[in-house]
Image (cartoon, rainbow, N blue to C red):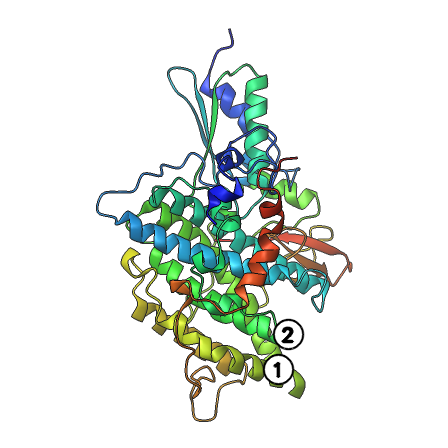
Amino acid sequence: MTDEDLHVDGEDDLYVDGDGARWAFGTGFTDPLHGVDQSVPDGVDAEDLAACCLALGDDALVSAQRLAEWCTRAPELEEELALANIGLDLLGQARLLYARAGRADGTGRGEDAYAYFRYPEDFRNVRLAELPGGDFAFTVARLLVLSVWRLAVCEALAAAPDPVLAAIAAKSAKELAYHSRWAAEWTVRLGDGTGESAGRMRAALDALAPWLDELLTDRAAARQGADPAAVAARTRLELFHVLADAGLDRSDDVSPLETPAPPVPGSGRNGRHTPHLAPLLAELQSVARAHPDASW
Amino acid sequence: MVTASPERASRIAAEVPDPELPMLTLADLGVLHGVEVAPEGTVVVRLAPTYAGCPAVAEMRAEVTARLLAAGFTDVRVVTVLDPPWSTDRITDEGRRKLAEHGIAPPGPRGAPGPAPARTWLRLTSGPPEVPCPRCASADTEEISRFAATACTALRRCRSCREPFPHVKDLP
Protein backbone atom coordinates (compact mmCIF):
# COMPACT_ATOMS: atom_id res chain seq x y z
CA MET A 1 0.00 0.00 0.00
CA THR A 2 1.15 3.52 -0.61
CA ASP A 3 0.26 6.58 1.36
CA GLU A 4 -2.31 7.42 -1.27
CA ASP A 5 -4.21 4.24 -0.52
CA LEU A 6 -4.56 5.53 2.98
CA HIS A 7 -6.18 8.74 1.80
CA VAL A 8 -3.70 10.99 3.48
CA ASP A 9 -3.21 13.25 0.51
CA GLY A 10 -4.74 16.07 2.47
CA GLU A 11 -2.09 15.79 5.15
CA ASP A 12 -0.58 19.16 4.32
CA ASP A 13 -3.57 20.63 6.04
CA LEU A 14 -2.24 19.26 9.30
CA TYR A 15 0.68 21.62 9.25
CA VAL A 16 -1.08 24.88 8.67
CA ASP A 17 -0.10 27.41 11.24
CA GLY A 18 -3.60 28.06 12.45
CA ASP A 19 -4.68 30.18 15.37
CA GLY A 20 -5.35 28.28 18.54
CA ALA A 21 -3.27 25.35 17.38
CA ARG A 22 -3.18 22.45 19.82
CA TRP A 23 -0.64 19.75 20.24
CA ALA A 24 -2.17 16.40 19.29
CA PHE A 25 -2.89 14.50 16.12
CA GLY A 26 -5.77 15.96 14.18
CA THR A 27 -5.90 19.23 16.05
CA GLY A 28 -3.62 21.21 13.78
CA PHE A 29 0.09 20.65 14.08
CA THR A 30 2.37 23.53 13.53
CA ASP A 31 5.58 23.26 11.58
CA PRO A 32 8.28 23.09 14.25
CA LEU A 33 10.66 24.85 11.86
CA HIS A 34 8.13 27.58 11.16
CA GLY A 35 9.86 30.69 9.89
CA VAL A 36 13.34 29.16 9.75
CA ASP A 37 15.18 29.54 6.43
CA GLN A 38 15.04 25.97 5.18
CA SER A 39 16.93 26.16 1.89
CA VAL A 40 19.71 23.57 1.63
CA PRO A 41 23.07 25.33 1.25
CA ASP A 42 25.25 24.78 -1.82
CA GLY A 43 27.70 21.99 -1.32
CA VAL A 44 25.45 20.01 1.01
CA ASP A 45 24.23 16.71 -0.43
CA ALA A 46 20.50 17.10 0.18
CA GLU A 47 19.78 13.39 -0.14
CA ASP A 48 22.39 12.49 2.44
CA LEU A 49 21.21 15.30 4.71
CA ALA A 50 17.65 13.96 4.53
CA ALA A 51 18.83 10.42 5.28
CA CYS A 52 20.83 11.64 8.27
CA CYS A 53 17.86 13.61 9.67
CA LEU A 54 15.55 10.65 9.10
CA ALA A 55 17.86 8.20 10.89
CA LEU A 56 18.34 10.48 13.90
CA GLY A 57 14.65 11.39 13.90
CA ASP A 58 13.62 7.74 13.90
CA ASP A 59 16.03 6.96 16.76
CA ALA A 60 14.40 9.75 18.76
CA LEU A 61 10.79 8.85 17.94
CA VAL A 62 11.17 5.15 18.71
CA SER A 63 13.08 5.90 21.93
CA ALA A 64 10.40 8.38 22.98
CA GLN A 65 7.71 5.77 22.46
CA ARG A 66 9.56 3.19 24.59
CA LEU A 67 10.03 5.77 27.34
CA ALA A 68 6.35 6.72 27.20
CA GLU A 69 5.49 3.08 27.97
CA TRP A 70 6.65 3.73 31.53
CA CYS A 71 3.75 6.11 32.15
CA THR A 72 1.79 4.74 35.16
CA ARG A 73 4.36 1.93 35.54
CA ALA A 74 7.56 3.50 36.84
CA PRO A 75 8.85 2.61 40.31
CA GLU A 76 8.36 6.18 41.61
CA LEU A 77 6.35 9.16 40.45
CA GLU A 78 9.48 11.31 40.20
CA GLU A 79 11.19 8.82 37.91
CA GLU A 80 8.05 8.46 35.84
CA LEU A 81 8.10 12.20 35.28
CA ALA A 82 11.78 12.04 34.40
CA LEU A 83 11.24 9.28 31.83
CA ALA A 84 8.23 11.06 30.32
CA ASN A 85 10.10 14.36 30.14
CA ILE A 86 13.13 12.78 28.51
CA GLY A 87 10.78 11.13 26.02
CA LEU A 88 9.15 14.48 25.35
CA ASP A 89 12.53 16.07 24.62
CA LEU A 90 13.30 13.28 22.16
CA LEU A 91 9.91 13.70 20.53
CA GLY A 92 10.74 17.37 20.06
CA GLN A 93 14.04 16.45 18.46
CA ALA A 94 12.24 14.01 16.15
CA ARG A 95 9.76 16.69 15.07
CA LEU A 96 12.53 19.10 14.09
CA LEU A 97 14.52 16.40 12.30
CA TYR A 98 11.49 15.17 10.34
CA ALA A 99 10.63 18.69 9.30
CA ARG A 100 14.21 19.11 8.08
CA ALA A 101 14.14 15.74 6.27
CA GLY A 102 10.95 16.70 4.45
CA ARG A 103 12.55 19.81 3.03
CA ALA A 104 15.88 18.20 2.25
CA ASP A 105 14.43 15.16 0.45
CA GLY A 106 12.30 17.42 -1.73
CA THR A 107 9.01 15.74 -0.85
CA GLY A 108 7.85 18.53 1.41
CA ARG A 109 6.45 15.91 3.79
CA GLY A 110 5.60 17.06 7.28
CA GLU A 111 6.32 15.40 10.58
CA ASP A 112 3.25 13.16 10.71
CA ALA A 113 3.88 11.75 7.25
CA TYR A 114 7.10 10.38 8.73
CA ALA A 115 5.80 9.38 12.14
CA TYR A 116 2.39 7.98 11.27
CA PHE A 117 2.32 6.92 7.64
CA ARG A 118 5.42 4.82 7.10
CA TYR A 119 5.83 1.08 7.53
CA PRO A 120 8.39 -0.63 9.77
CA GLU A 121 10.74 -1.31 6.84
CA ASP A 122 10.75 2.43 6.07
CA PHE A 123 12.10 3.25 9.52
CA ARG A 124 15.85 3.78 9.88
CA ASN A 125 16.34 3.71 13.65
CA VAL A 126 19.02 1.59 15.27
CA ARG A 127 17.58 -1.65 16.62
CA LEU A 128 18.65 -1.02 20.21
CA ALA A 129 15.99 1.71 20.38
CA GLU A 130 13.16 -0.65 19.45
CA LEU A 131 13.94 -3.57 21.78
CA PRO A 132 11.13 -4.20 24.29
CA GLY A 133 11.20 -2.21 27.50
CA GLY A 134 12.49 -4.83 29.90
CA ASP A 135 12.91 -3.84 33.53
CA PHE A 136 13.91 -0.49 34.97
CA ALA A 137 17.60 -1.46 34.86
CA PHE A 138 17.37 -2.19 31.15
CA THR A 139 15.65 1.16 30.56
CA VAL A 140 18.43 2.94 32.45
CA ALA A 141 21.21 1.04 30.67
CA ARG A 142 19.71 1.58 27.25
CA LEU A 143 19.10 5.26 27.90
CA LEU A 144 22.69 5.64 29.10
CA VAL A 145 24.10 4.07 25.95
CA LEU A 146 21.76 5.80 23.52
CA SER A 147 22.02 9.24 25.10
CA VAL A 148 25.81 9.18 25.45
CA TRP A 149 26.16 8.08 21.83
CA ARG A 150 23.59 10.57 20.55
CA LEU A 151 25.28 13.35 22.51
CA ALA A 152 28.58 12.54 20.80
CA VAL A 153 26.84 12.62 17.41
CA CYS A 154 25.00 15.87 18.13
CA GLU A 155 28.05 17.67 19.51
CA ALA A 156 29.83 16.88 16.25
CA LEU A 157 26.82 17.85 14.15
CA ALA A 158 26.64 21.24 15.85
CA ALA A 159 29.32 22.17 13.29
CA ALA A 160 27.46 20.57 10.37
CA PRO A 161 27.57 22.49 7.08
CA ASP A 162 23.75 22.66 7.04
CA PRO A 163 22.86 25.43 9.49
CA VAL A 164 19.42 24.00 10.31
CA LEU A 165 20.80 20.57 11.20
CA ALA A 166 23.60 22.28 13.14
CA ALA A 167 21.10 24.30 15.19
CA ILE A 168 18.90 21.26 15.87
CA ALA A 169 21.97 19.28 16.96
CA ALA A 170 23.23 22.04 19.26
CA LYS A 171 19.83 22.30 20.92
CA SER A 172 19.55 18.53 21.21
CA ALA A 173 23.02 18.25 22.76
CA LYS A 174 21.95 20.43 25.69
CA GLU A 175 19.03 18.11 26.36
CA LEU A 176 21.05 14.92 25.86
CA ALA A 177 23.59 16.14 28.39
CA TYR A 178 21.04 15.95 31.20
CA HIS A 179 19.43 12.79 29.83
CA SER A 180 22.76 11.02 29.99
CA ARG A 181 23.43 12.46 33.46
CA TRP A 182 20.12 11.09 34.74
CA ALA A 183 20.91 7.67 33.27
CA ALA A 184 24.48 7.75 34.64
CA GLU A 185 23.25 8.58 38.13
CA TRP A 186 20.83 5.66 38.10
CA THR A 187 23.50 3.37 36.67
CA VAL A 188 25.72 4.18 39.63
CA ARG A 189 22.87 3.92 42.13
CA LEU A 190 21.81 0.50 40.86
CA GLY A 191 25.29 -0.81 40.12
CA ASP A 192 26.59 0.30 43.50
CA GLY A 193 23.37 -0.65 45.30
CA THR A 194 22.20 -4.05 46.48
CA GLY A 195 23.16 -7.43 45.08
CA GLU A 196 19.78 -7.53 43.37
CA SER A 197 20.10 -4.08 41.74
CA ALA A 198 23.68 -4.72 40.61
CA GLY A 199 22.64 -8.09 39.20
CA ARG A 200 19.83 -6.43 37.26
CA MET A 201 22.23 -3.84 35.85
CA ARG A 202 24.70 -6.53 34.78
CA ALA A 203 21.91 -8.48 33.11
CA ALA A 204 20.76 -5.31 31.34
CA LEU A 205 24.26 -4.57 30.07
CA ASP A 206 24.63 -8.15 28.87
CA ALA A 207 21.31 -7.88 27.06
CA LEU A 208 22.19 -4.71 25.18
CA ALA A 209 25.86 -5.42 24.48
CA PRO A 210 25.25 -7.35 21.22
CA TRP A 211 23.39 -4.31 19.82
CA LEU A 212 26.14 -1.82 20.61
CA ASP A 213 28.18 -2.51 17.50
CA GLU A 214 25.41 -1.07 15.32
CA LEU A 215 25.81 2.27 17.09
CA LEU A 216 29.58 2.31 17.13
CA THR A 217 29.88 1.57 13.41
CA ASP A 218 27.02 3.84 12.37
CA ARG A 219 27.75 6.18 9.47
CA ALA A 220 24.36 7.92 9.22
CA ALA A 221 25.83 11.29 10.22
CA ALA A 222 29.32 10.72 8.81
CA ARG A 223 28.98 12.97 5.77
CA GLN A 224 27.30 15.73 7.77
CA GLY A 225 30.24 16.16 10.09
CA ALA A 226 30.13 13.42 12.74
CA ASP A 227 33.21 11.26 12.29
CA PRO A 228 32.16 7.71 13.20
CA ALA A 229 35.51 6.80 14.76
CA ALA A 230 35.53 9.90 16.97
CA VAL A 231 31.90 9.32 17.99
CA ALA A 232 32.66 5.70 18.86
CA ALA A 233 35.75 6.63 20.87
CA ARG A 234 33.88 9.29 22.83
CA THR A 235 30.98 6.93 23.51
CA ARG A 236 33.28 4.16 24.75
CA LEU A 237 35.19 6.56 27.00
CA GLU A 238 32.07 7.97 28.64
CA LEU A 239 30.52 4.55 29.17
CA PHE A 240 33.76 3.16 30.55
CA HIS A 241 33.95 5.87 33.23
CA VAL A 242 30.31 5.58 34.27
CA LEU A 243 30.45 1.80 34.50
CA ALA A 244 33.65 2.02 36.51
CA ASP A 245 32.00 4.49 38.92
CA ALA A 246 29.08 2.06 39.18
CA GLY A 247 31.35 -0.86 40.04
CA LEU A 248 30.13 -2.59 36.92
CA ASP A 249 33.48 -2.78 35.18
CA ARG A 250 35.13 -6.13 34.91
CA SER A 251 38.23 -7.01 36.88
CA ASP A 252 40.25 -7.30 33.68
CA ASP A 253 39.76 -3.59 33.07
CA VAL A 254 37.41 -4.20 30.17
CA SER A 255 34.07 -2.52 29.91
CA PRO A 256 31.26 -5.04 30.43
CA LEU A 257 29.87 -3.76 27.15
CA GLU A 258 32.85 -5.23 25.30
CA THR A 259 31.07 -8.52 25.29
CA PRO A 260 32.51 -11.73 23.99
CA ALA A 261 29.05 -12.34 22.50
CA PRO A 262 29.11 -11.47 18.81
CA PRO A 263 27.15 -8.46 17.56
CA VAL A 264 23.78 -9.16 15.97
CA PRO A 265 24.34 -8.83 12.21
CA GLY A 266 22.49 -6.26 10.15
CA SER A 267 21.31 -2.75 10.88
CA GLY A 268 18.06 -0.90 11.34
CA ARG A 269 19.65 1.81 9.20
CA ASN A 270 18.85 -0.42 6.19
CA GLY A 271 15.27 -0.97 7.30
CA ARG A 272 15.99 -4.46 8.64
CA HIS A 273 14.40 -4.47 12.06
CA THR A 274 13.66 -6.87 14.86
CA PRO A 275 10.09 -8.15 15.16
CA HIS A 276 9.60 -5.66 18.01
CA LEU A 277 9.33 -2.54 15.87
CA ALA A 278 6.07 -3.42 14.10
CA PRO A 279 3.92 -3.71 17.26
CA LEU A 280 5.47 -0.50 18.61
CA LEU A 281 4.53 1.38 15.44
CA ALA A 282 1.10 -0.24 15.31
CA GLU A 283 0.31 1.31 18.67
CA LEU A 284 1.96 4.64 17.87
CA GLN A 285 0.15 4.95 14.54
CA SER A 286 -3.23 3.42 15.40
CA VAL A 287 -5.26 6.62 15.72
CA ALA A 288 -3.68 8.37 12.75
CA ARG A 289 -4.11 5.31 10.53
CA ALA A 290 -7.70 4.69 11.56
CA HIS A 291 -8.66 8.32 11.01
CA PRO A 292 -6.09 9.84 8.64
CA ASP A 293 -8.14 12.95 8.01
CA ALA A 294 -9.35 13.34 11.55
CA SER A 295 -9.63 16.73 13.14
CA TRP A 296 -11.29 17.81 16.34
CA MET B 1 -5.15 53.81 10.88
CA VAL B 2 -2.99 52.29 13.56
CA THR B 3 0.66 53.24 13.44
CA ALA B 4 2.74 50.14 12.87
CA SER B 5 5.44 51.28 15.24
CA PRO B 6 8.07 48.72 16.13
CA GLU B 7 8.15 49.95 19.73
CA ARG B 8 4.44 49.37 20.16
CA ALA B 9 4.62 45.92 18.54
CA SER B 10 7.58 45.04 20.74
CA ARG B 11 5.77 46.12 23.87
CA ILE B 12 2.69 44.05 23.02
CA ALA B 13 4.72 40.93 22.20
CA ALA B 14 6.88 41.39 25.30
CA GLU B 15 3.83 41.40 27.58
CA VAL B 16 2.49 38.01 26.48
CA PRO B 17 2.68 35.62 29.44
CA ASP B 18 4.44 32.29 29.20
CA PRO B 19 1.83 29.50 29.13
CA GLU B 20 3.65 27.34 31.69
CA LEU B 21 5.12 30.02 33.94
CA PRO B 22 2.37 32.64 33.60
CA MET B 23 3.97 34.98 36.13
CA LEU B 24 6.66 35.61 33.50
CA THR B 25 6.26 37.38 30.21
CA LEU B 26 7.96 36.11 27.08
CA ALA B 27 10.43 38.96 27.52
CA ASP B 28 11.17 37.99 31.14
CA LEU B 29 11.78 34.42 30.07
CA GLY B 30 14.09 35.50 27.25
CA VAL B 31 12.04 33.62 24.67
CA LEU B 32 11.38 36.81 22.72
CA HIS B 33 14.35 37.38 20.44
CA GLY B 34 13.18 40.46 18.63
CA VAL B 35 10.34 42.24 16.93
CA GLU B 36 10.69 44.04 13.63
CA VAL B 37 8.24 45.88 11.47
CA ALA B 38 8.92 45.62 7.75
CA PRO B 39 8.38 48.74 5.61
CA GLU B 40 5.10 47.37 4.27
CA GLY B 41 3.83 46.92 7.83
CA THR B 42 4.41 43.20 8.43
CA VAL B 43 5.32 42.52 12.05
CA VAL B 44 7.94 39.79 12.40
CA VAL B 45 8.25 38.33 15.90
CA ARG B 46 11.18 36.03 16.63
CA LEU B 47 10.74 33.38 19.36
CA ALA B 48 13.37 30.95 20.65
CA PRO B 49 11.74 27.82 22.11
CA THR B 50 13.03 26.82 25.54
CA TYR B 51 13.05 23.11 24.73
CA ALA B 52 12.88 21.46 21.33
CA GLY B 53 9.84 19.52 22.47
CA CYS B 54 8.19 22.36 24.34
CA PRO B 55 4.48 22.05 23.54
CA ALA B 56 3.94 25.64 24.64
CA VAL B 57 5.51 27.13 21.52
CA ALA B 58 2.31 26.81 19.51
CA GLU B 59 0.41 28.52 22.33
CA MET B 60 2.93 31.34 22.48
CA ARG B 61 2.79 31.83 18.74
CA ALA B 62 -1.01 31.90 18.69
CA GLU B 63 -1.20 34.32 21.62
CA VAL B 64 1.39 36.73 20.21
CA THR B 65 -0.41 36.74 16.87
CA ALA B 66 -3.83 37.23 18.44
CA ARG B 67 -2.70 40.15 20.58
CA LEU B 68 -0.96 41.94 17.73
CA LEU B 69 -3.95 41.49 15.44
CA ALA B 70 -6.25 42.74 18.19
CA ALA B 71 -4.01 45.78 18.56
CA GLY B 72 -4.57 46.68 14.95
CA PHE B 73 -1.56 45.17 13.21
CA THR B 74 -2.81 43.50 10.08
CA ASP B 75 0.03 41.20 9.10
CA VAL B 76 1.90 39.25 11.75
CA ARG B 77 4.54 36.57 11.28
CA VAL B 78 5.94 34.65 14.23
CA VAL B 79 9.14 32.81 13.36
CA THR B 80 11.23 30.31 15.28
CA VAL B 81 14.83 31.00 16.23
CA LEU B 82 16.93 27.88 16.74
CA ASP B 83 20.32 29.52 16.73
CA PRO B 84 21.46 30.73 19.18
CA PRO B 85 19.54 28.24 21.32
CA TRP B 86 17.66 29.47 24.38
CA SER B 87 19.44 29.17 27.71
CA THR B 88 18.48 30.03 31.26
CA ASP B 89 20.97 32.91 31.02
CA ARG B 90 18.32 34.59 28.88
CA ILE B 91 15.91 34.88 31.83
CA THR B 92 16.07 38.55 32.81
CA ASP B 93 16.74 39.86 36.32
CA GLU B 94 13.11 40.94 36.46
CA GLY B 95 12.10 37.41 35.46
CA ARG B 96 14.27 35.94 38.23
CA ARG B 97 12.73 38.26 40.78
CA LYS B 98 9.19 37.28 39.72
CA LEU B 99 10.00 33.57 39.86
CA ALA B 100 11.31 33.86 43.42
CA GLU B 101 8.30 35.97 44.39
CA HIS B 102 6.07 33.09 43.23
CA GLY B 103 7.94 30.44 45.18
CA ILE B 104 10.02 29.17 42.28
CA ALA B 105 13.77 29.22 42.72
CA PRO B 106 15.38 30.89 39.70
CA PRO B 107 18.40 29.39 37.94
CA GLY B 108 21.90 30.41 38.99
CA PRO B 109 23.29 33.90 38.27
CA ARG B 110 23.51 34.90 34.63
CA GLY B 111 26.78 34.24 32.94
CA ALA B 112 28.12 32.51 36.06
CA PRO B 113 31.08 30.32 35.25
CA GLY B 114 29.91 26.75 34.89
CA PRO B 115 31.51 23.84 36.70
CA ALA B 116 35.14 23.30 35.79
CA PRO B 117 35.54 21.22 32.64
CA ALA B 118 35.71 17.60 33.63
CA ARG B 119 37.51 14.74 32.00
CA THR B 120 34.15 13.54 30.76
CA TRP B 121 30.67 14.94 30.34
CA LEU B 122 29.23 12.74 33.01
CA ARG B 123 30.16 14.17 36.35
CA LEU B 124 27.92 12.76 39.00
CA THR B 125 26.55 15.63 41.01
CA SER B 126 23.20 16.20 42.61
CA GLY B 127 22.33 19.39 40.83
CA PRO B 128 23.67 22.87 41.50
CA PRO B 129 25.51 23.15 44.82
CA GLU B 130 23.28 25.75 46.39
CA VAL B 131 19.72 26.74 45.60
CA PRO B 132 18.27 28.96 48.31
CA CYS B 133 14.68 28.33 49.40
CA PRO B 134 12.41 30.94 47.77
CA ARG B 135 10.25 31.04 50.92
CA CYS B 136 12.66 31.23 53.84
CA ALA B 137 15.93 31.90 51.98
CA SER B 138 17.66 29.02 53.75
CA ALA B 139 20.54 27.61 51.74
CA ASP B 140 19.90 24.16 53.18
CA THR B 141 17.86 22.59 50.39
CA GLU B 142 17.96 19.25 48.59
CA GLU B 143 16.94 18.00 45.19
CA ILE B 144 14.02 15.57 45.23
CA SER B 145 13.67 15.09 41.51
CA ARG B 146 15.58 16.40 38.52
CA PHE B 147 12.29 16.58 36.59
CA ALA B 148 9.21 18.21 38.09
CA ALA B 149 5.85 19.31 36.67
CA THR B 150 7.51 20.76 33.59
CA ALA B 151 10.68 19.73 31.80
CA CYS B 152 12.37 23.00 32.71
CA THR B 153 11.95 22.69 36.47
CA ALA B 154 13.39 20.39 39.12
CA LEU B 155 11.70 19.65 42.43
CA ARG B 156 13.59 20.57 45.61
CA ARG B 157 12.82 20.64 49.34
CA CYS B 158 13.96 23.08 51.97
CA ARG B 159 15.45 21.33 55.01
CA SER B 160 14.75 24.38 57.19
CA CYS B 161 11.08 25.15 56.52
CA ARG B 162 10.40 21.68 55.05
CA GLU B 163 8.50 23.13 52.11
CA PRO B 164 8.99 21.67 48.63
CA PHE B 165 9.57 24.12 45.80
CA PRO B 166 10.25 24.04 42.06
CA HIS B 167 13.57 25.23 40.70
CA VAL B 168 14.13 26.41 37.14
CA LYS B 169 17.07 24.23 36.13
CA ASP B 170 20.20 25.77 34.77
CA LEU B 171 20.44 25.11 31.05
CA PRO B 172 23.61 26.87 29.98
Q: Which mark is residue A135?
A: 2
Q: Residue furthest bottom?
A: A252
Rendered view: B39 above or below A243? above
Three-letter code, disc 2: Asp
- In the image, A174 versus A17, the foreground residue is A17
Residue A239 in percent (x, y) is at 45, 76
The residue depicted at 57 percent of the width and 71 percent of the height is: A140
Rendered view: A210 above or below B72? below
Pinpoint the chain carrying mark 1: A
Residue B93 in percent (x, y) is at 55, 41
Q: Is disc 1 placed on a helix, strand or loop?
A: helix
Residue B145 in percent (x, y) is at 66, 62
- In the image, B96 versus A96, the foreground residue is A96
* Residue B15 in view (yes/no): no
Mark 2 and mark 1: Cα distance apart in space: 8 Å
The residue depicted at 58 percent of the width and 62 percent of the height is: A279
Q: Residue furthest top?
A: B1
Q: Earlier in the sequence, mark 2 or mark 1?
A: 2
Q: Which mark is residue A200?
A: 1
- In the image, A182 versus A121, the foreground residue is A121
Instruction: Verify CB contact (< 8 Å) between mark 2 and mark 1.
Output: yes
Pinpoint the chain carrying mark 2: A
Rendered view: A85 above or below A273? above
* Residue A110 in view (yes/no): yes
Rendered view: B51 above or below A14? below
Q: Which mark is residue B38?
A: none
Q: Is disc 2 placed on a helix, strand or loop?
A: loop
User: For residue A214, which quarter of the picture?
Assistant: bottom left
